[in-house]
Amino acid sequence: MKFICIGRNYAEHAKELGNEVPDEPVIFMKPRTALLQYNAPFYYPEFTNELHYECELVIRISKNGKYISQKTARKYYDSITVGIDFTARDIQNELKKKGLPWEKAKAWDNSAVIGKFKPLAPEVDVKNINFHMNKNGELVQKGNSGMMIHNIDKIVSYVSNYFSLNIGDMIFTGTPAGVGECVVGDELEGFFEGESLFKLMVQ
Ligand code: ZN
């Protein structure tokens, strides 16, 4: 299993970090060891002083494929949830300045938080899904999949031109505006269409 993540997929978020809005999806990956087991405790990593949450819609691949067309992409994923692409922003800023890869900032152990998956019926419009995240009970991020620069089917198709997709792979589809810092003691709770799918405390 692997995580494929999309960067800068919401214009407002690209702007808040001072990034250009890309013509093509920005892709990076996290290894299997990045997965935080469901409901496992999350510990603030010792190598960062600026831990950021990025709440995102996450889809799960249900069929192996390569060179998938946008038209058929919907057949390759059957469930969805919200998750957090945890980012050591201080490290990422250093790496970006030097033009280096992002793994030390993005792909570390337990940096991928996954909520409870919801089955996605074929008739669900994946271009109109609402999600949000609260920090300590207050709204910090809110998104709708219709605001994505590259929609989910396009992402699946595009990614599959480079990487074979296998059953169980998960794709983080990018974060809306409102990313920010969290500290020990913060509680983060992610919602899909108003339903809570994960809740974690930074320890
Ligand atoms: Zn992200």
Image: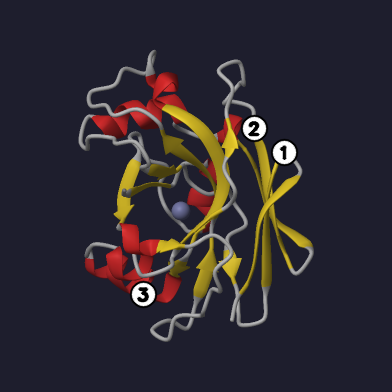
Q: Which mark is residue 128?
A: none
Quarter of the image where the C terminus is located: bottom right
Q: Report how far apart the C-alphas of labels 2 and 3 lie in the structure.
A: 32 Å
Is 145 placed above or below 137 here? above
Q: Give the residue type at disc 1.
A: Glu
Q: In the image shown, does 128 or 13 lie closer to the viewer? A: 128
In the image, is 28 to the left or to the right of 140? left
Q: Can you identify the residue that label 3 sits on? A: 91
Q: Can you identify the residue that label 1 sits on? A: 193
From the image, state whether disc 3 or disc 1 is nearer to you. Answer: 1
On the image, the x and y values in percent for residue 93 come to 37, 70
User: Can residue 118 be seen at all in this image of the molecule?
Assistant: yes
Q: Report how far apart the C-alphas of labels 3 and 1 lie in the structure.
A: 33 Å
| Residue lying at 42% horizontally and 86% vertically, measured from the top left | 46
Label 3 CA crowd tier, 10 Å (few <14, some 14–19, many 20+):
many
> Which secondary structure, mark 1?
loop
> Which secondary structure, mark 2?
loop
On the image, the x and y values in percent for residue 130 come to 68, 37
On the image, the x and y values in percent for residue 178 come to 62, 57
Which of pointers 2 and 3 lies earlier in the amino acid sequence?
Answer: 3
Q: Are marks 3 and 1 in contact (CB under 8 Å)?
A: no
Within the image, what quadrant is residue 68 found in? top left
Label 2 CA crowd tier, 10 Å (few <14, some 14–19, many 20+):
some
